[in-house]
Amino acid sequence: MKKIFKSWKKLAVILPLLAACSQHASSPVRQLDDPDTEPSSSDCRTVQHSIGEATICGQPDTIISLSPYTLELLLALDIQPSGFADHTPFSQDIFTNPAQQIPYLGDRITTQPANVGTAYEPSIESILALEPDLIIGNEWLREPETLASIAPLLVLEWAEPETSLRAIAQAVGQPEKAETLIADLNQKVATAREEFEPVVASHPSALVLSSADSREFQVLSSPNNLCSALVSDLGFQVLSLSDEDQGEMNGARPTPISVEALPQFEQADSIILLGSDRETINQFNDLNQFKENQTAALKAEWEKNAIAQSMKASQSGRVYLIPVYLCLGLPGPIGTELYLEELQEQLL
């Protein structure tokens, strides 16, 4: 009750100020050793983000992540979150067992972060109760000015993982670590490209499809698409629809096609099926079950569909299923490495 009263008291102070806030507003991090002392300007950093800039002073200690995407970047920098908002709503007040609750990233979390709502609608009351030093979210955040009035806020672009990683690293005073992570990942991809050379030589073309309901597919091929870009970086010729690349380049969703349209890609040597299942995304007890839940429906539909089975790739056993969550939900260094490992395990 004491915490709840404190949260509402703070909210009552903040609400009258919101009208004066812009979406570029931010406030300095309080000094950890003396909350009544103004931080030295020499200990402050101004970090650019997608809707403005934020000033961070001192070392952020209580950090809130408002999406798996930003959580991934924090964990890559070896920083544990104090609060987390996932895409899927959970009833728990805290993530008591992150490894069982947060796909792919939970086993890297050593604390029990507070549940602060969802990535799209975070709980202001829960965030206030944590008294954060830094809040990190994505461009889909609603009313970012409210969050910026609570603590310094970074709003990061989902499709710009390297830029986002650098921004967080600067905010926490570890800019050199971001460069190391980026360089290491680029080296891993370059090494993997050499490993894939024999496969690419014998099976050069690849079709990358994503599907949520097994009835229609999105053809992914643009260099800007986080799922198809890695396949291309490994040396494969990624097949595309004639007008699909331009749509992806402009940030539009790829044009969906039905299973009946798949024969136009008959030349595909390999097909990578990226599956998702929103109904079962939070019904898993371990990572293997999560993978199965996300691809089981797509696998079943593909195997019983005569058109899908007539494709050259199906006939030669070169159809591979991977959860789309890996490349869309986690486009940073952790997700990219896990996606790369899946491609290596299955295609090699």
Image (cartoon, grey):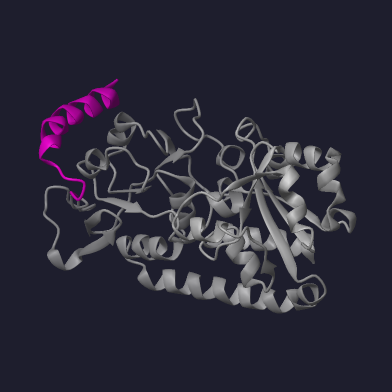
The one nearer the camera, 134 or 275, is: 275
Residue lying furthest top in this view? 1
Q: What is the quadrant of residue 228 in the picture?
A: bottom right
The one nearer the camera, 164 or 214, is: 214
Q: Is residue 5 magenta?
A: yes
- How many numbered dots are placed on residues in this image? 0
> Can you give x and y, in whole percent of width and height, for residue 299 in the image?
78, 42
Q: Is residue 95 rendered to the left or right of residue 134?
A: right
In the picture, the quarter occupied by the N terminus is top left
Q: What is the quadrant of residue 260 in the picture?
A: top right
Q: Is residue 42 rendered to the left or right of residue 189?
A: left
What residue is rendered at 66% in x and 77% in y? 191
Task: Please give the range of residues in magenta.
Answer: 1-26
> Can you give x and y, in whole percent of width and height, for residue 90 in the image?
50, 29
Q: Is residue 204 rendered to the left or right of residue 225?
A: right
Q: Main secondary structure of the magenta part?
A: helix
The one nearer the camera, 225 or 336, is: 225
Q: Is residue 276 magenta?
A: no
> Can you give x and y, in whole percent of width and height, for residue 126 in the image?
34, 31
What residue is rendered at 22% in x and 42% in y? 145
Q: Is residue 204 rendered to the left or right of residue 71?
A: right
In the picture, the quarter occupied by the C terminus is bottom right
Above-or-below relation of 87 to 41: above
> Can you give x and y, in whole percent of width and height, for residue 292 in the image?
74, 41
